[in-house]
Image (cartoon, rainbow, N blue to C red):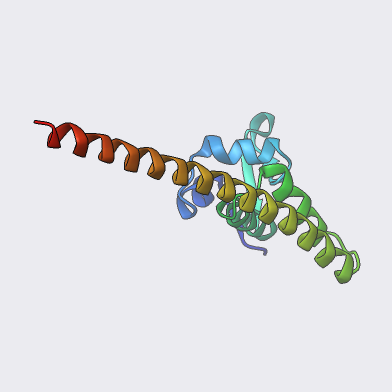
Amino acid sequence: MPITYTISDLAKEFDLTTRAMRFYEDMGLLQPERTGPAGRNRIYSARDRTRLRLTLRAKRLGLSLSEAKDIIDVYDSPRDTGAQLRKFLEVLGQHRQQLEDRMADLQMNLDEVREHENEARQLLDKVDGAK
């Protein structure tokens, strides 16, 4: 019999709320089997557990959930490994470029703040020297 997990099992293991788990399900990242009255109980497979782990790893990298889903879906399909790796590199390259652009903007802002700090210190030195 295959290993299965409840929503509580995975939520606890990955330090998530059950609400977050249901959100990932709504996004198509997880596809638990539904059992019980009106399908209210969710049974997650080892595949779902792996997809959740990959989703959280993608989030830590700063990828959006839709980017994470695209990558995970590519790896989950029985396609050519080369195509999968090219897609992964494409998404990572785009994300890296976004991060580098943001870092450049932050560096410019930081440089401007330092410039204003220096100007304020020089003015303060003049004010203090005039006393």
Residue 16 rendering spot, x and y as whole percentages: 49, 45
Residue 99 rendering spot, x and y as whole percentages: 62, 51
* Quadrant (top left, top right, bottom left, bottom right) of the N terminus: bottom right
State the residue at coordinates (51%, 49%). 107
State the residue at coordinates (70%, 46%). 29
Instruction: Check the image and name the residue furthest to the left.
Output: 131
Would you say 119 lies left or right of 108 here? left
State the residue at coordinates (46%, 46%). 111
> Is 23 above or below relative to 94?
above
Would you say 100 lies left or right of 87 here? left
Instruction: Check the image and name the residue furthest to the front.
Output: 130
Task: Judge by depth and name the residue closer to the eye, 124 or 6.
Answer: 124
Would you say 28 lies left or right of 74 here? left
Please identify the quarter of the rendering in which residue 125 is found: top left
* Quadrant (top left, top right, bottom left, bottom right) of the C terminus: top left
All told, the count of numbered labels is 0
Task: Judge by depth and name the residue closer to the eye, 33 or 16.
Answer: 16
> Is 52 above or below relative to 34?
below
Residue 75 rendering spot, x and y as whole percentages: 79, 61
Task: Judge by depth and name the residue closer to the eye, 129 or 12.
Answer: 129
> Is 55 above or below relative to 80?
above
> Is 33 above or below relative to 36?
below
Please identify the quarter of the rendering in which residue 46 is found: bottom right
Would you say 88 lies left or right of 56 here? right
Residue 5 rendering spot, x and y as whole percentages: 58, 53
